[in-house]
Every structure is written in C-alpha cells, then in structure tokens.
Image (cartoon, helix red, strand yellow):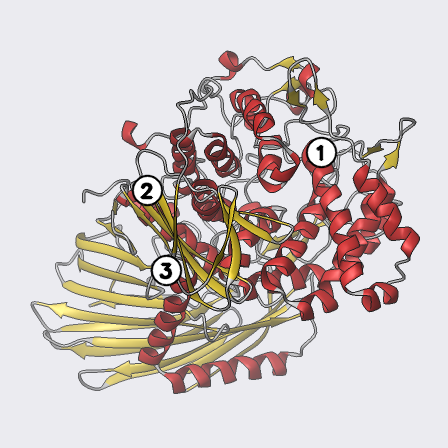
C-alpha cells in the first residue's frame, strides 16, 4: 500500500523508506528498542545526524532542585530526571577519510524497518560520499528480552564499484551533547536539561572490549557500560582500542575490495546500582558481555524471535477492514511490551524508555492504562511493576505522615518513589493515584490468582491505601463519606470536593482491602488490622458520596461541576492544548475537561452506573472534553462503544493509536505515549470486545463498528488462555489452554471448555452521537 506519513502499511512491520532529516526526532522515538530495563532510541549508528541520542536505564536518574516562587510546608524539595547514560550505539564510518553523514553526499536508497515479530530494527542505506564513493550499509540491532542487560548491533559495510579503505570507530560515549531539546519551561511535558550528569570513575579496555563506569553527583547512582566486538574481515586490518574518561573507542581500519564486506558485531552491556562498588559493577558488565559473546548474534536473534512468538500467542489482536489500523495496533502492543517486559520491580515511565519526556517519570497512567493490558497478556510484567510500588511503601508512608495523614500516600509523579511534582493542584492533590494502585493490585490478584504476590505485597498495599482514604475522607453531618480538596483525572478542574472518579476508586480500594484481609487473615493481623478497622472501611465505602445533578439527570464530575460557567469553545478553537494558551486561573472555574474523567470512571467502575446513566453522562461530557491529554481518546472510545456510538468509538480509537505514529500532539520526538498505546488494547478488548472484570467475573459484550468486519483478541484469565473472534453477527469463544472458565456474553453466562462457543450479537438501534467541542473533532485519517 502507499505510505502514510512516510511509513509503508504492513501488518507486522513499521517500514520507513527515503530520507527526511526533519523527521529524525520522530523516527528516533518510533524506532526505539527496549526491554523495560535498557532503552535505545532509534538514532543512527554513525552518531549524526541526531535529535536526541538517548540511552536509558529503568530507574536511573539524577536529582535536581525544584524551584518555587513561594515555598510551603510539604512541598517536595527535589525532582528526579532520567539520565541519558553512556551511549554504546555509536559506530562511526569513514569512507576514504570522508565521515559517513546522511546530511552530506547523496543518499541513493534508505530504509529502516522495526519488526514486531523479530524484535529488531533493521536498516539499509546506499550512500555516495561527496567525493563520489558509494557504499551499502546494513545494520540490525536488538535489545534482548531474554538477557535483560544486553543489547547488540550487527553492522556491515560493502564498497560498491571499487576497492575502498574503510575505518570503523565503535564508541562508548558518556555525557554526549543533547541537541534539539526544548525547554520544559516552554512546555511542561518536556524534560529538564541536565548538564554533564555523569562523573567518571573508571575507564578500561583490552583487545576488542572496553568498559566505562560513572556515577551521578547527587542521586549517588553508579552505571557501568561495556562493549565487546566480533570482526569479519576480507583481509587483515589495523585495530586499536583506547578508553579515557567519557570515551572508549575501538578503531578498525581495513582495505576492503569491492564484492566483499566489513562486518562488525557489537555487544553492549549495562548495569547500575545505588549500592554496589565500581569493581562489582564492572564485573557484572564483563560477565554480561561474556555471556552475550558466548551466545552469539544469531542465537540472540533467535531467542528474541522465540520470546515474541510467545507474546503474540497470548496478546495478538487481529483486525479486518483497516490495514493501517491493524499495523498501528500491533505497533502499540509491541511498544507496551517493550516498556514493561523486563522492568524487574522498577517503574514503567509514561514514555517508557523511548525519550526524556516528562523527565522519565511514572504516573497513574501505569496502573490505570498500561497494567490492564499487561495483567491479561504478560502478567509477570504487571506483577513486577506492582512489586516496585510495594518496594516504595516506606516512602509512601513517610509522605502521608508529612502531610498529616495515615497509611500510605503514593506520589503523583516519580522515578524512585519520592514525590517530585512541584505543582500542588495537579500533583499532590491527585490522590486518586493511590486508589489507582490499589485497583490495579486487586485486578492483578483476581486475574492471576498470584497468592504469593498477595501475601508478600498485595495485602499491605491494599491495607495502607485503605488506611489513607479512611483517614483522609470524613463523614459529614448527613452521614455521607466525603473526600474534599482534591484533583481528579481532569487537570482542568482542580482542588474540588467529591470527584466521582476519585470517590469510586477509593470506594473500590476500601472494599478490596476488606476482601484481602478476609482472604489473608494472618497477613492482616501482622499488619495490625482489626475487625473494627475493616468494619469502618466498609462503612466508609457504603457511605461514599457520588454527586448527581437531578435536574440535568447526569452525574457531576465533582460537586457543583454542572453549576460552573461553560467554557467558550469558539474562542479557543485552534488554540489547543489549552494549558499552553490559557491560565489555569481561568480553566479551573469553567466547565471544560482536559481528559476523560467521569467517562473513564464509567468504564473502570461500570457496575456503579446504569446503562441509562452511562448514555446520559457520555452525552453531557463528550461535548465539553477537549482531549488535551493523550489519555483521553481511548477512555472515551471504550465508553462510546458501550453506549452504542460504535463509529465514534472507532474514530476515537484511531486518535489514540495514531497519537505517536502521526504525532498528533506534536511532541513524539520526546518519547512515546505508552498509555495511549496501551489504549489500543483497551479499545479493542474492552471497547469493541466489551470485556469487563468486576469482582472476578469476566464478561463480554462485543460489537464492531461499521469499518471493521472482523476482530479477534487473546487474553489470559488465571491459568486459562482464550481467544475471542467477533464479526458483525456472532462472537466465538475458544479455550486455547488451561482449565475451563466461566464467562458471560451480553449477560448470558456460559462455561468455556474444550468446545468453542458461538453466540449471536444483539442488534442495536441507530443512535446519533453528540458533537465534540469545536476544533476537537476526533482525528480523521481520511481527511489527511
């Protein structure tokens, strides 16, 4: 098919043909490779041209001061920013003394391919130097899913038409210049700039290998980066290696006859620690490189492919009717896997390890958007992220105590578990993040039956979060339980009382804590939980305030929200996102929604709303939601599908899954929007598949939009692997492996065993969807 935005449409690949220097920042992000521990942006091996070179390690950061115009008690004192660590991707090429640089000479052919089945990034370039020499360059790189500390590149150069003298310089480079970075002062979604964040501790080399060890000045983290090589030469070559301070370099100079190739395989190893010594880190990297070389390039590739075969067996989504959407969905699932696969009890950042956006922080996005997909497809990865949250429990307790609260209060944004949001109304006040963690914990336990996790981490997470909300809220004179002075998911409506999303999330967290204590009474006693305490949690949950406007027949996003003045959408048409064009002073006082808030609550806590309420609420809130957040479209899509606006749901899903591929927010160069990509799974499985999991009962209510003729998806429910196939009239459920499982289809319960179950899909009458705010219509690819 013809390329859109430079990409060929292909079901299992993202292929870019041709060269567009202005697109380098975007393609570096889109072609990023990661395993959840190491992240490599898709910058060229030759080092330049480059926008943001980007090599990241999960959880590796530097501290920085948070400036305040006026200080206040309880304000976080320091922030954390992800560090671009030592870059091992660089393999510079000189062709007869001419540096290979795509900005000079002539690029005859150029293509790059991100392969979702092999887990590699391939590149092929035919380049003619300014002096008229032509070479063919082919490279392939991977970040290993099976060996989490290892990445590798195979790089080959072939002279075309004549013999040539070629030089390769394979580098380890620390503190490399970070060009192309805009200021976070100009756009709060971007990262703070760090000036030379790494301090040298060790530089050593021998034969074809080298290692550099550095540490950060303030956070006290140490990082070791190493490289080793294998050479395939048509004849002899001169080689040398050096290491000093911030640079280690292997140089290979060879006379290469036409018809032959110079091939370099580069193995890269990384390790970091807050406690281990320089010799210990160096030893770790030496061992990782030895293991990688012993495994070899071809075996590493095969392991990568085998790992992805298993992933797609559990997670693939197949669509008929929209080939570009099919590609985008698999692109999305692949990158969500890369973000969380091997995090090993560390946070999953909002940008994954694809760029420095949001300073590398994790938010509530992880538990509310990313973990639902991972829980039902790669449950081990979901469990590891929740174990990271549990590992930060002491910090969460300390934060709660600092703010005169009980239990545990988890940070709005963080890398290490400390709060580092300097803006109180859209940071600390977003207490729903703690409830989101509790909800993700309970969902994971229900979906996996992981009792070891529940005993070791889950009960404590649920108990301490329940203690926080039971103490943070209060009963009023009418006996209703209130949660006041907080900010819900909609960051254009801050410091409010009784936000419905927050209250329902807290209500669920309280009930889940009671249930966990009942299942694990020994653990509950160890945590000091009493019968009176759980009874109080139940009372708080039962008495929870849920604001409702009787006159309008809709829920209020927060208390009195429907009484606020309406935003003038005609005035702001063409001036989005509003946060970059209008003061919060104005936004906070009006009915304008940044991202789906109440609408998202109707998906996550859908058993608390009637079908009639869901329809009325969607009709009210969709016309005032501007979707200035990448989190919004997927939330609106899943609820639009449930209330019967299937074609609108299709358009909103498209907006979510093409957020990065088509750079809809004009900031993809700073990293992917992992939560929006996870929304591809949510919109297919929960939206058009109608999957819900309330109190351990998994149900489906599938319906397809008019532009899709078929959809199938796979998921895991405890030990059972199932596939659901949907067309316009029927849905077929198959058990691929594991024990029988009880499900429901449009309210009809059935047991899925060895035999497939095919059921009809009830017809829907026509419904006219509400209009979006002017200038905020869903993304239309057909209008491009």
Secondary element under disc 2, as helix, strand or loop, is helix
Cα separation between marks 1 and 3: 44 Å
Q: Earlier in the sequence, mark 1 or mark 3?
A: 3
| Residue indicated by mark 3 | 47
Mark 3 crowd level (few <14, some 14–19, many ≥20, 10 Å Cα): some
Determine if residue 423 is in view.
Answer: no
Residue 241 sits in which quadrant? Answer: bottom left
Q: Is residue 300 above or below residue 511?
A: below
Cα separation between marks 2 and 1: 39 Å
| Residue indicated by mark 2 | 22
Q: Position of residue 100 (x, y in %)?
A: 26, 60
Residue nearest the observer in this picture, 707 or 210: 707
- Residue 460, numbered label: none
Residue nearest the observer in this picture, 532 or 307: 532
Mark 2 crowd level (few <14, some 14–19, many ≥20, 10 Å Cα): few
526 lies left or right of 700: right
- Which corner quadrant holds the N terminus? top left
Q: Position of residue 45 (x, y in %)?
A: 34, 63
| Residue indicated by mark 1 | 487
């Amino acid at each position: 098919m013809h390329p859109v935005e430079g990409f060929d449409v292909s079901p299992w690949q993202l292929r870019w043909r041709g060269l567009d220097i202005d697109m380098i920042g975007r393609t570096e992000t889109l072609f990023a490779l990661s395993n959840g521990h190491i992240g490599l942006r898709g910058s060229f091996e030759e080092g330049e041209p480059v926008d943001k070179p980007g090599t990241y390690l999960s959880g590796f950061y530097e501290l920085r001061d948070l400036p305040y115009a006026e200080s206040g008690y309880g304000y976080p004192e320091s922030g954390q920013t992800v560090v671009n660590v030592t870059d091992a991707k660089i393999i510079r090429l000189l062709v007869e003394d001419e540096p290979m640089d795509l900005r000079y000479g002539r690029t005859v052919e150029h293509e790059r391919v991100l392969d979702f089945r092999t887990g590699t990034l391939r590149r092929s370039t035919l380049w003619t130097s300014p002096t008229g020499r032509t070479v063919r360059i082919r490279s392939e790189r991977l970040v290993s899913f099976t060996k989490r500390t290892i990445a590798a590149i195979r790089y080959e150069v072939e002279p075309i038409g004549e013999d040539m003298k070629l030089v390769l310089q394979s580098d380890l480079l620390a503190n490399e210049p970070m060009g192309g970075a805009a200021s976070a002062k100009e756009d709060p979604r971007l990262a703070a700039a760090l000036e030379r964040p790494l301090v040298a501790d060790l530089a050593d080399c021998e034969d074809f290998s080298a290692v550099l060890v550095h540490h950060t000045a303030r956070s006290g983290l140490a990082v070791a980066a190493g490289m080793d090589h294998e050479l395939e030469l048509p004849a002899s070559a001169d080689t040398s290696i050096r290491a000093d301070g911030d640079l280690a370099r292997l140089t290979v100079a060879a006379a290469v006859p036409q018809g032959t190739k110079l091939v370099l395989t580069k193995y890269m190893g990384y390790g970091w620690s807050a406690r281990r010594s320089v010799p210990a880190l160096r030893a770790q990297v030496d061992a990782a490189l030895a293991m990688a070389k012993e495994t070899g390039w071809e075996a590493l590739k095969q392991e990568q492919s085998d790992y992805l075969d298993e992933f797609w067996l559990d997670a693939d989504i197949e669509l008929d009717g929209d080939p570009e959407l099919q590609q985008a969905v698999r692109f999305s699932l692949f990158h969500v896997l890369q973000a969380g696969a091997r995090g090993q009890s560390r946070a999953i950042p909002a940008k994954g390890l694809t760029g420095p956006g949001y300073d590398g922080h994790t938010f509530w996005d992880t538990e509310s958007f990313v973990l639902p997909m991972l829980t039902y497809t790669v449950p081990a990865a979901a469990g590891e992220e929740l174990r990271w949250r549990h590992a930060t429990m002491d910090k969460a307790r300390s934060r709660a105590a600092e703010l005169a609260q009980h239990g545990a209060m988890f940070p709005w944004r963080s890398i290490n578990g400390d709060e580092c949001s300097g803006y109180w109304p859209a940071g600390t006040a977003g207490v729903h993040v703690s409830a989101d963690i509790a909800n993700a914990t309970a969902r994971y336990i229900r979906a996996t039956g992981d009792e070891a996790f529940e005993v070791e981490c889950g009960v404590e997470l649920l108990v301490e979060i329940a203690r926080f909300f039971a103490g943070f809220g209060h009963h009023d004179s009418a006996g209703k339980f209130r949660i006041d002075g907080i900010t819900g998911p909609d960051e254009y409506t801050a410091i409010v009382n009784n936000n419905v999303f927050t209250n329902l999330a807290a209500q669920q967290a309280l009930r889940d804590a009671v249930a966990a204590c009942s299942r694990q009474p020994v653990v509950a006693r160890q945590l000091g939980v009493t019968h009176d305490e759980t009874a109080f949690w139940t009372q708080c949950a039962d008495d929870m305030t849920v604001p409702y406007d009787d006159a309008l027949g809709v829920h209020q996003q927060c208390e009195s929200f429907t009484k606020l003045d309406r935003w003038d959408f005609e005035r702001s048409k063409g001036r989005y996102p509003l946060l970059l064009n209008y003061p919060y002073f104005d936004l906070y006082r009006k009915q304008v929604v940044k991202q789906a808030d109440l609408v998202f609550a109707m998906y996550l806590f859908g058993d608390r709303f009637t079908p009639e309420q869901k329809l009325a609420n969607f009709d009210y809130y969709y016309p005032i939601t501007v979707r200035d957040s990448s989190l919004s479209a997927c939330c609106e899509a899943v609820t639009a599908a449930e209330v019967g606006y299937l074609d609108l749901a299709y358009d909103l899903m498209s907006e979510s899954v093409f957020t990065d591929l088509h750079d809809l927010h004009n900031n993809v160069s700073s990293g992917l929007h992992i939560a929006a990509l996870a929304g591809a799974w949510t919109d297919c499985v929960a939206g058009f598949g109608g999957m819900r999991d309330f109190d351990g009962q998994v149900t489906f209510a599938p319906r397809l939009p008019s532009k899709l003729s078929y959809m199938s998806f796979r998921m895991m429910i405890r030990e059972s692997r199932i596939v659901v196939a949907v067309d316009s009239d029927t849905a077929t459920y198959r058990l691929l492996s594991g024990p029988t499982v009880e499900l429901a289809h449009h309210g009809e319960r059935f047991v899925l065993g060895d035999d497939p179950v095919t059921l009809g899909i009830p017809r829907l009458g026509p419904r006219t969807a509400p209009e979006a705010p002017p200038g905020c219509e869903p993304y239309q690819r057909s209008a491009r």
